[in-house]
């Protein structure tokens, strides 16, 4: 399975469609994504290479810091992003434009520039290989300046300047097909990362910071009804009694790992918990039995009261209907949740998620 870009009668779109073949690191994905973003934002054909590599870091920031995706052993972008966060103190959930502004304003800081310089060594030249078949950087610069084979851009590197210039014949195409080209890049990046994060769920949802997280209003209505029909419940973390509409909803395994709001991973909790637990993992040996009892209680309350909620369909992803879950023995119900949560928890631990105490 593959994704194609729009063909064009007079452009070498076949070459552009092959830029991600034989890719062993993420640089090309973030390089091209940053180029088309700058082009769309500024409408300029000339782009400073430092601006492009800064945006590469900004685009890689969220999947690395927030979702902890592995970029592979041969990829230095991961380490560069981690080190730049340590140097600058930019929040891990910062927006792309904020990251670009901070790094751009501090580009003359030698600690920052030395990290960014690493990204300028290969990718500006290697990206053009589908058009110009040479591994010699100087030759690539010279041949690109003639726009050989109508390559996407030319490279200009002098003592004080390092920039690329988009081939004017590509200008309209890049504007008209920006969304498709961005999707093409993200699709290929997702395939690349999937191979390096084989057990991580929803890779494609972890490449871009969502503008707004999905509302949990349906899940709140469900738990409000459970409390209304079954009486107050207790927070599994603090033991505090929780009443209708007086609680927060907690992702037992952090949203930053699972990237979903399925009901079997969502429980009411003391309002103070989200700030203290954050994106840490619960201690399963202590908290999983409590989660299981609360989940079982909620299902039985709804089944016994003959209440139906669309969110109850979330349990089908565990392989059972709510009626089947309600009819399970306590031991079988516990076994199901152990088989569900223990592998997820272990993968998250392997990726660097910490356990909350």
Image: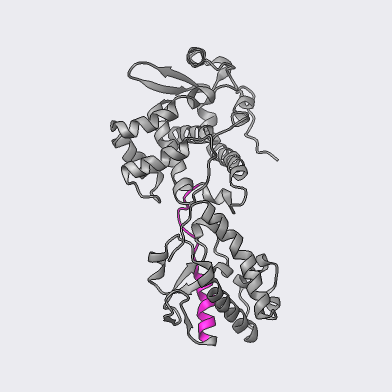
Q: In this view, does 216 lie above or below 298?
A: above
The picture places residue 268, in percent across and down from the top left corner, at 48, 74
Quarter of the picture holding the C terminus: bottom left
Q: What residue is rendered at 47% in x and 68% in y? A: 250
Q: In this view, does 318 lie above or below 22?
A: below
Q: What residue is rendered at 43% in x and 26% in y? A: 120
Which portion, as a residue range, is magenta?
Answer: 208-228
Q: Is residue 38 above or below residue 70?
A: above
Which of the pair 155/190 is nearer the observer?
190
Q: Which quarter of the figure has residue 312?
A: bottom right
Extreme front residue here? 285
The picture places residue 93, in percent across and down from the top left corner, at 40, 51
Q: Which colour scheme is used?
A: one colour
Q: Is residue 226 magenta?
A: yes
Q: In this view, does 93 lie to the left or right of 316?
A: left
Q: Which quarter of the figure has residue 341?
A: bottom right
């Amino acid at each position: 399975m593959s994704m194609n870009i729009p063909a064009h009668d007079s452009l070498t779109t076949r070459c552009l469609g092959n830029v991600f073949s034989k890719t062993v690191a993420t640089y090309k994905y973030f390089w091209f994504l940053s180029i088309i973003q700058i082009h769309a934002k500024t409408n300029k054909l000339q782009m400073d290479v430092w601006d492009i590599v800064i945006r590469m870091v900004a685009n890689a920031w969220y999947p690395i810091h927030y979702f902890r995706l592995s970029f592979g052993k041969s990829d230095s972008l991961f380490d560069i992003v981690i080190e730049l966060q340590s140097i600058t103190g930019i929040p891990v959930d910062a927006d792309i434009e904020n990251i670009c502004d901070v790094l751009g304003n501090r580009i003359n800081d030698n600690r920052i520039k030395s990290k960014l310089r690493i990204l300028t060594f290969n990718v500006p030249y290697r990206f053009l290989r589908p058009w110009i078949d040479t591994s010699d950087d100087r030759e690539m610069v010279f041949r690109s300046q003639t726009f050989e084979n109508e390559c996407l851009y030319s490279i200009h590197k002098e003592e004080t300047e390092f920039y690329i210039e988009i081939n004017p014949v590509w200008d309209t195409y890049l504007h008209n097909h920006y969304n498709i080209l961005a999707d093409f890049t993200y699709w290929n990046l997702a395939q690349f990362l999937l191979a390096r994060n084989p057990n991580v769920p929803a890779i494609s949802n972890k490449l871009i910071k969502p503008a707004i997280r999905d509302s949990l209003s349906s899940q709140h209505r469900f738990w409000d009804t459970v409390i209304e029909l079954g009486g107050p419940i207790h927070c599994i973390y603090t033991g505090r009694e929780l009443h209708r509409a007086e609680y927060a909803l907690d992702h037992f395994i952090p949203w930053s790992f699972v990237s979903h709001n399925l009901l079997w991973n969502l429980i009411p909790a003391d309002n103070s918990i989200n700030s203290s637990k954050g994106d840490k993992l619960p201690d399963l040996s202590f908290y999983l039995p409590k989660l299981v009892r609360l989940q079982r209680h909620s299902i039985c309350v709804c089944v016994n009261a003959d209440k139906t909620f669309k969110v109850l369909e979330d349990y089908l992803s565990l392989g059972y209907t709510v009626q089947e879950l309600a009819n399970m023995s306590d031991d079988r119900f516990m076994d199901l949740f152990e088989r569900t949560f223990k592998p997820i928890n272990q993968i998250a631990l392997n990726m660097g998620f910490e356990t909350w105490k």
